[in-house]
Image (cartoon, rainbow, N blue to C red):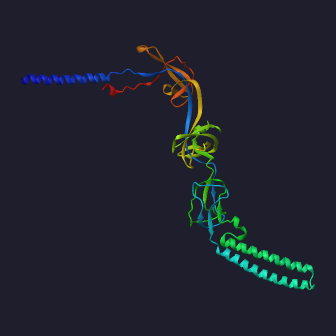
C-alpha cells in the first residue's frame, strides 16, 4: 500500500513539473504582433481652444466723496439701480481747525469792515443830503458799503462750508451728498456708517464710497497662450460657459487682443476681451468664472485618419499602407501631406485616397481575458 502511495505522489510531482515546463515554454514563444487598421474617411475638423477667465462689466466706476469726513448716512445697498445724480451717501464734515479758525477770522474782519463802511456811508449820505459833498463821493461810499456786504456774505458762506460742508447759498449742490456719477447697478459699497472717508487729491486716491457699473454691457476677460494667439482675429465668435450656470451658454465676439504678453507660470500669455451678448432675462453677476471656446481653424469635408496612425519624422509625415491579407499581409511606408488636426483626427491633403487601408498602433493584448 505504501508502495502505491509513493508512486501516486511521484506521478503528481511529475505532472506539476511537466505542466510548469509547458506553461513557461508557451509564454516564451513570440506572439504575433497585431495592428489596428483604419480606412480614410471624409469628415469635418475643428481646432478649438478653451480660455479661462471671468465675466465683468466693461466700465466699473468708483464713486468717491468731494470732501473728507465721516459717513453719516447710506441711502443705497449693493444691487440697487441708480441713475446719474442719485444720492448714495451723506458725509458729515470734520472741519480742519486751522481752516475753521481762518474762516471765523475772515467773518469777524468782514463784520468790522462792514460796520466801518456803514458808518462812512451814513456820514456821506447826511452830507450829500445837505449838498456838502458831490454825488461822486456819495456813490463811492455807497459802492464801498455794497462791497463790504458782499464780502460779509462770502465770508459767512466760506465759514459754513468749512464747518458744515455746505452753505445756505449752495445747499442744492451740497458736497456732503455723495452722488452717483453714472447710471447702473451698485456692485459694492465698501464703507459703513461711521467710517472716515477722504477726498481724492494729489497724494491720495480717495475713499471709494460705491462701485457702479452698467450690467447690460459685459465683457469676458481671459488670457490665451502665445502659441495660439496668432490664430485670433478681431470679431471671431466665441461660446461662453459660466461655471455657476452650466445650463446656459452665451455668444460673444472677440474685440481686443493685447499687444503685449504677460508671464504666467513660466509661459507668455496675451490678454483678450470679448463682448458678451446677454438676453435681458439672463442675469449675470460681475466676477463669474467662465470658459470661452474659440474655433481657431476648421476644414470641411476633408479626408481624415486618426492621428495615431501618423509617423512623424522631422518635418515629414508617413503612414503604413496595408498590403495583402492574412499571413501574406505586409506594410508599405508612404509619405503623406497632412493638414489640420483636432487632436484626434488629422487631415490628409496628399498621399492617400478613400480606398487605402492604413496601419494604426499595435493592439495590446489583455492578458486578464486569457485567464
245 with respect to 201 (left or right): left
The residue drawn where x is 92% and y is 83% is: 133
Q: Return the x and y of residue 371 as percentages of the image width and height.
A: 30, 26
Quadrant, the N terminus:
top left
Q: Is residue 124 above or below residue 223?
A: below
Residue depicted at 76% across the width and 76% down the height: 152
From the viewer's side, name the closer residue of 62 and 335: 62
From the viewer's perspective, is residue 207 above or below residue 130?
above
Asked if residue 165 is positioned above or below residue 354 in the image, the reply reads below
Q: Quadrant of residue 120?
A: bottom right
* Of 343 and 195, the residue lying toward us: 195
Label count reads 0
Question: Picture coordinates of residue 298 (x, y %)?
Answer: 59, 30
Q: Is residue 336 left or right of 326 when viewed as pictured?
A: right
Query: Which residue is more in the foreground, 259 or 144?
Result: 144
Query: From the viewer's perspective, is 293 left or right of 202?
Result: left
Q: Residue at x 59, y 28 (%)?
A: 299
Q: Quadrant of residue 45?
A: top right
Q: Nearer the viewer, residue 155 or 292?
A: 155
Please state the horizontal and vertical placement of residue 36, each as a whole percent of the image: 44, 22
Q: Residue 66: horizontal and vertical position, in percent? A: 66, 64
Question: In the orientation shown, which residue stands out farthest toward the left?
Answer: 1
Amino acid at each position: 500500500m505504501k508502495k502505491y502511495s509513493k508512486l501516486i505522489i511521484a506521478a503528481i510531482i511529475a505532472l506539476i513539473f511537466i505542466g510548469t515546463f509547458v506553461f513557461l515554454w508557451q509564454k516564451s514563444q513570440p506572439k504575433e504582433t497585431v495592428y489596428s487598421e483604419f480606412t480614410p474617411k471624409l469628415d469635418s475638423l475643428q481646432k478649438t481652444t478653451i480660455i479661462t477667465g471671468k465675466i465683468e462689466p466693461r466700465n466699473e466706476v468708483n464713486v468717491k466723496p468731494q470732501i473728507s469726513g465721516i459717513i453719516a448716512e447710506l441711502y443705497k445697498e449693493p444691487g440697487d439701480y441708480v441713475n446719474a445724480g442719485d444720492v448714495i451717501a451723506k458725509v458729515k464734515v470734520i472741519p480742519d481747525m486751522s481752516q475753521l479758525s481762518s474762516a471765523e477770522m475772515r467773518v469777524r474782519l468782514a463784520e468790522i469792515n462792514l460796520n466801518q463802511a456803514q458808518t462812512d456811508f451814513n456820514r456821506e449820505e447826511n452830507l450829500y443830503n445837505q449838498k456838502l459833498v458831490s454825488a461822486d463821493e456819495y456813490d463811492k461810499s455807497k459802492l464801498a458799503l455794497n462791497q463790504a456786504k458782499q464780502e460779509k456774505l462770502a465770508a459767512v458762506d466760506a465759514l459754513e462750508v468749512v464747518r458744515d460742508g455746505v452753505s445756505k447759498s449752495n445747499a442744492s449742490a451740497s458736497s456732503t451728498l455723495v452722488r452717483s456719477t453714472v447710471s447702473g447697478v451698485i456692485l459694492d459699497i465698501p464703507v459703513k456708517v461711521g467710517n472716515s472717508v477722504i477726498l481724492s487729491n494729489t497724494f491720495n486716491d480717495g475713499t471709494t464710497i460705491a462701485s457702479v457699473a452698467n450690467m447690460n454691457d459685459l465683457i469676458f476677460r481671459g488670457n490665451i497662450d502665445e502659441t495660439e494667439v496668432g490664430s485670433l482675429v478681431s470679431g471671431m465668435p466665441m461660446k461662453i460657459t459660466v461655471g455657476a450656470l452650466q445650463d446656459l451658454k452665451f455668444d460673444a465676439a472677440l474685440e481686443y487682443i493685447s499687444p503685449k504678453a504677460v508671464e504666467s507660470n513660466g509661459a507668455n500669455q496675451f490678454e483678450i476681451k470679448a463682448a458678451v451678448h446677454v438676453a435681458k432675462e439672463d442675469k449675470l453677476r460681475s466676477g463669474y468664472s467662465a470658459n470661452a471656446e474659440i474655433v481657431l481653424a476648421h476644414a470641411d469635408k476633408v479626408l481624415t485618419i486618426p492621428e495615431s496612425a501618423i509617423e512623424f519624422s522631422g518635418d515629414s509625415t508617413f503612414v503604413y499602407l496595408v498590403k495583402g491579407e492574412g499571413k501574406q499581409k505586409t506594410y508599405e511606408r508612404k509619405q503623406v501631406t497632412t493638414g489640420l488636426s483636432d487632436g484626434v483626427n488629422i487631415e490628409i491633403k496628399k498621399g492617400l485616397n478613400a480606398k487605402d487601408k492604413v496601419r494604426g498602433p499595435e493592439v495590446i493584448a489583455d492578458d486578464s481575458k486569457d485567464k
